[in-house]
Each structure stands twice: as structure tokens, then as C-alpha cells.
């Protein structure tokens, strides 16, 4: 299985990414996590992205707040799918990061999840990697079935409570 790259613009983004790491581990997806900044280490971020495919990665997840250019810079230097996680900062509650991540020019796509949406980023990465991995696709199918069963159970409890 190809690896997932997890890039964060700052070490302060680490707590937001904890659900992502847990979900990747649950799916048994190998990953590497790095701190790279689009502004403070642009050459490093560009080099990482340019060599990601040859280094065994199948998807790149980039989390950043404020100006949040990391996902876009990475996407400009790779043909791998890039998933952006806008990180909430104290400034504009993450709206600045969301707009910076989602408003990419034509030809440089970044799949963007919700502000602080690390869990969905991991699930989307798993869906991308599952295109070439049937066992991973089965794990995703089981996850969907489990979610359905949980909602049905919650509905039953609510129905009993309101009767």
C-alpha cells in the first residue's frame, strides 16, 4: 500500500491532526508526518511534493491555518491528490484558512475538508488509496455499515424515549 503524507504548517497544528492519525492507524495506512511551511520552508515543501510519488506516497494531506498556502504550494508541485485541512486560528475562526485552501486556480486542485476536519481528511485519503487496495475498500465499507447501524440504534432509542 502506498503511504499517506501528512504535512502541517506548524507544530501547533498537531492537536487538530490527532483524529487523522488515529483514523489512519485504524485503517492500517502507513504515513509520515512532517512540519513544513509554505512561507518559512517553501523550498523544502516544494521538494517534498515533487518527490512524493517516487518516495512511495499515494496522497498528501496538508494542514495549515491563517494564510494556509501549504496545500496549494504542495499541489502545484505534484500530480498526487492533495487534501487540504484548513486549521482554525484565533484570527478569523478558520475562515481565512478555509478560503486560502479551497480557492485554488484552475489546474491546481486541492480537495478541501471542513475547518479542523482531520477525520474526514483521513477517510478521504483512505478512499483514494482504496482504489488500488481491496482490503482497504472493505474496511471503508465496514465503516459505512457500522455508521448506519449506529444511527439506526440511536433512532430506536429516540423512538422509545418519545413514546
Image (spheres, rainbow, N blue to C red):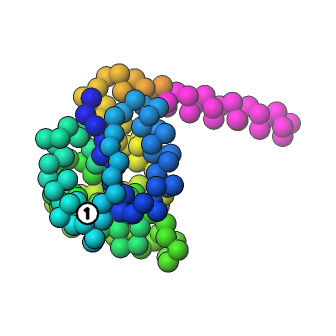
- Vertically, is 131 above or below 16? above
- Where residue 153 appears, as percent x and y from the top left, is 69, 30
For the point 41% across and 67% down, the residue is 65
Magenta segment boundaries in residue numbering: 143-163
- Vertically, is 14 above or below 54? below
- Where residue 106 appears, as percent x and y from the top left, is 18, 64
Write down the quadrant of residue 10 in the picture.
bottom left
Write down the quadrant of residue 158 in the picture.
top right
Residue closer to the observer: 92 or 10 = 10
Does residue 130 appear in this view?
Answer: yes
Residue occupied by mark 1:
72
- Tell me which secondary structure the magenta stretch mostly adopts: helix
For the point 50% across and 77% down, the residue is 91
- Vertically, is 120 above or below 44? above
Instruction: Specify the farthest residue to the bottom.
Output: 91
Q: Is residue 91 magenta?
A: no
Give the left or right position of residue 124, taking residue 72 as reference: right
- Where residue 104 appears, as percent x and y from the top left, is 26, 66
Instruction: Specify the farthest residue to the right.
Output: 163
Q: Is residue 155 magenta?
A: yes
Does residue 120 appear in this view?
Answer: no
For the point 42% across and 60% down, the residue is 11
Q: Quadrant of the N terminus?
A: top left
For the point 52% across and 27% down, the residue is 145
Amino acid at each position: 500500500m502506498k503511504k499517506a503524507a501528512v504535512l502541517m504548517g506548524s507544530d501547533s497544528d498537531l492537536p487538530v491532526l490527532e483524529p487523522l492519525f488515529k483514523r489512519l492507524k485504524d485503517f492500517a495506512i502507513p504515513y509520515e508526518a512532517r512540519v513544513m511551511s509554505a512561507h518559512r520552508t517553501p523550498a523544502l515543501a516544494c521538494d517534498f511534493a515533487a518527490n512524493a510519488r517516487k518516495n512511495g506516497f499515494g496522497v498528501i494531506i496538508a494542514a495549515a491555518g491563517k494564510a494556509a498556502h501549504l496545500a496549494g504550494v504542495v499541489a502545484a508541485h505534484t500530480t498526487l491528490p492533495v487534501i487540504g485541512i484548513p486549521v482554525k486560528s484565533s484570527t478569523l475562526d478558520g475562515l481565512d484558512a478555509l478560503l486560502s485552501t479551497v480557492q485554488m486556480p484552475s489546474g491546481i486542485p486541492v480537495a478541501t475538508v471542513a475547518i479542523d476536519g482531520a477525520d474526514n481528511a483521513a477517510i478521504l485519503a483512505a478512499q483514494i488509496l482504496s482504489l488500488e487496495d481491496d482490503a482497504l475498500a472493505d474496511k471503508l465499507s465496514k465503516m459505512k455499515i457500522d455508521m448506519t447501524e449506529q444511527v439506526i440504534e440511536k433512532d430506536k432509542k429516540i423512538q422509545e424515549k418519545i413514546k
